[in-house]
Image: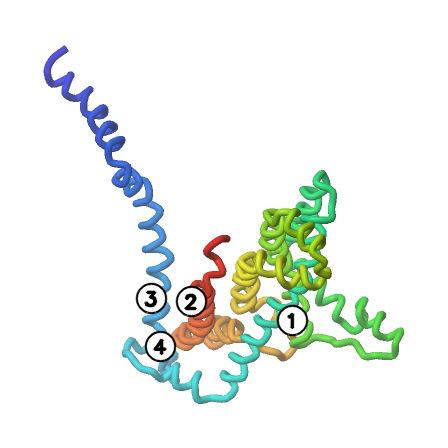
Amino acid sequence: MSIESRERSASPHRVSTWLYLHPRSRLAILLSAPLTWLVVAYLGSLATMIFSAFWSVDSFTGNVIHKLTLENFHILLTQSVYRDIALRSLGVAIFVTVVDALIAIPIAFFMAKVLAPGLRNFAVVIIILPLWASYLVKAYAWRTMFSDSGVLAWFFGRFHISTPGYGLFATAITLCYLWLPYMILPIYAGLERLPDSLLEASSDLGASAGKTFRSIIVPMIYPSIIAGSLFTFSLTLGDYIVVKIVGGKSQLMANVVYDNVGTAGNLPFAAAAALFPIIVILGYLTFVRKSGALENF
């Protein structure tokens, strides 16, 4: 074998040896492709949206004026209709998060501590099962139930009470149903790691069920509740389809973004409106991080 052939055959071996001796460089090479895609596709598009929020649209021609202005933000901050929509969106997100947490905690506790170990995996499948169905199918199913001829109208009619119908209440209830599995599963994971000995010791020391729940269970699953709330809160802020289906005349901030992208064709204003849920979620993430709720999750 010639010297050149031996050098060519030894080159891959030298490269593999160098990569083995430099694990950080090996990790950097492995992550370079996905990180490049993340920066270009996600962060790049996000930066473009933020930058375009400072543009405007000519009221006569409908063309985008590529000149920096604060007009879109001035409209969002000064016109009361957009302040009401922002507060309504925030209120619905908080309502959905709180209701899902109140429903998820007893369900998750039953799954983790009461149900037989052999049935827990089956229960998890039952919780995940609604996620396999189409989002639109579930939303339209709730539309049928909230209609004047739906199940809720029949139920309330037996007590001579008018059905809630379409509107903000229907939107909130539908969103509670859609995002409930995202709250149950993190809480179930947290409760599954909770030692039964802590509950037994609390009972042996004479603590009531309520005291045990407040002093032991809630502090232990608090990070799990926060993790679930990140899903329900952010998904609610960004949802616009449910409002279109069951919301009636109600409107949330995500619908302002959708309407200005499609109907109005005002992309800069839509980009400015889209900053509201981004800022709110970033603020919530900052609060969660400073509270230390996710350190041990």
**Which numbered mark, 1 or 3, is in the foreground of this view?**
1
Callout 3, which amino acid? Thr
Q: Where does residue 179 sit, x and y in percent of width and height?
A: 61, 60
Give 192 or 93, whichever is nearer the viewer.
192
N-terminal-most mark, 2 or 4: 4
Callout 1, which amino acid? Thr
Residue at horizontal 31 percent and vertical 78 percent from the top:
65
N-terminal-most mark, 1 or 4: 4
Rendered image quadrant of residue 252 = bottom right
Q: Is residue 207 left or right of residue 251?
A: right
Residue at horizontal 71 percent and vertical 53 percent from the top:
204
Q: Is residue 262 above or below residue 25?
A: below
Q: Where does residue 203 sit, x and y in percent of width and height?
A: 71, 54
**Residue on which the image places disc 1:** 171
The CA distance from mark 2 to mark 1 is: 28 Å
**Which numbered mark, 2 or 1, is in the foreground of this view?**
2
The CA distance from mark 1 to mark 3 is: 31 Å
Rendered image quadrant of residue 158 = bottom right
**Which numbered mark, 2 or 4, is in the foreground of this view?**
2
Q: Where does residue 66 sit, x and y in percent of width and height?
A: 29, 76
Give 179 or 245, whichever is nearer the viewer.
179
Q: Is residue 44 above or below residue 245?
A: above
- Circle on res. 63: 4
For disc 2, the neighbor class at 10 Å (few under 14, some 14 to 19, many from 20) is few
N-terminal-most mark, 2 or 3: 3
For disc 1, the neighbor class at 10 Å (few under 14, some 14 to 19, many from 20) is many
Q: Is residue 173 above or below residue 180?
A: below
